[in-house]
Amino acid sequence: MSTLSWIIVTSLLGGVLSVACAALFALNARAQFVSALVSYAIGALLGAVFLDILPEAITLTSSVTAVSATLLAGILLFFILEKLVLWRHCHHDHCEAHEPHTHNHDHGRSGTMIIVGDTFHNFVDGIIIAAAFLADTELGIITALAIIAHEIPQEVGDFVILLHSGYSKLRAFQLNLVSSLATLVGGTLGYFTLQTMQNLVPTLLALAAASMIYVAVADLIPGLHKRTQLRDTLQQVILIALGVGTVALVGAVVHI
């Protein structure tokens, strides 16, 4: 196959396979386990940000300050986005969207933001796959497999967040599948305009990291504080650590 064909096939399969593998786990989880898996999702998101995405952005940039500034601006951007989602639900101070403590989901707010951030991340993955194939076909295949392995824990977290936000299982799968197609877009554009796209990679990675940090810290962690018993707290800490550990373990195995 030509280099472009390899990029298209692996980018498409990479996105679809990572979503499918995550779906097998997340969509088959019992309903009563979803709230517990939110803690795992927090760990997976924060692990992906601090062990994978930000280190990669810092490695690729010539200015760490620029990456940090983009991260800060991204967090503010997602704060504004959440406000807009809330505003869409109602125009007064006492509607159901402003009363999260009385419902089991957040009316799609964190789901919307996690899909936006995941799309940025998938787009960058496609660029990375294109760069690897342009260097060497074998390197491209290895890189695509590594990206699939890295994505699975994060995609599980994304599914859990979408379910927690009130989306149906089918809708959560559809949104993740559409978001995964950004890998194909990034790979194709990367093939034709790689030099230009490489300059944007650190910025896109920082924006993806910002969305994940914001969702984990602003939307998901506050919900954990509703359960104050020591047993619940220990369970939450263990599951968060397990989420971080999964990302770290996959990263270690991939880089052996």
Image (cartoon, helix red, strand yellow):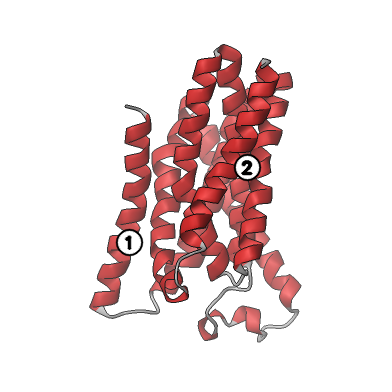
Give residue 114's quadrant in the image. Answer: bottom right
Q: In the rendered image, which residue does mark 2 sit on? A: 120
Q: Secondary structure at mark 2?
A: helix
Amino acid under disc 1: Leu
Q: Is residue 210 visible?
A: no
In the image, residue 120 lies at what x, y percent?
Answer: 63, 42
- Which residue is pictured at 55% across the width and 43% down the height? 17
Residue 196, relative to residue 206: is it above or below? above
| Local crowd size for mark 1, using a 10 Å CA cut-off: few (<14), some (14–19), many (≥20) | many
Question: In front: 224, or 20?
Answer: 20
Q: Secondary structure at mark 1?
A: helix
Mark 1 to mark 2: distance in Å?
Answer: 26 Å
Q: Quadrant of the N terminus?
A: top right
Q: Is residue 83 visible?
A: yes
Q: In the rendered image, which residue does mark 1 sit on? A: 239
Q: Would you say 114 lies left or right of 237 here?
A: right
Extreme residue in the front direction: 1
Q: Earlier in the sequence, mark 1 or mark 2?
A: 2
- Which residue is pictured at 64% across the width and 25% down the height? 7
In the image, residue 31 lies at what x, y percent?
Answer: 47, 74
Extreme residue in the top direction: 135
- Which residue is pictured at 57% across the width and 34% down the height? 125
Q: Quadrant of the C terminus?
A: top left
- Which residue is pictured at 60% across the width and 72% down the height? 166
Residue 72, relative to residue 240: is it above or below? above
In the image, residue 62 lies at what x, y percent?
Answer: 52, 23
In the image, residue 235 lies at what x, y percent?
Answer: 28, 69
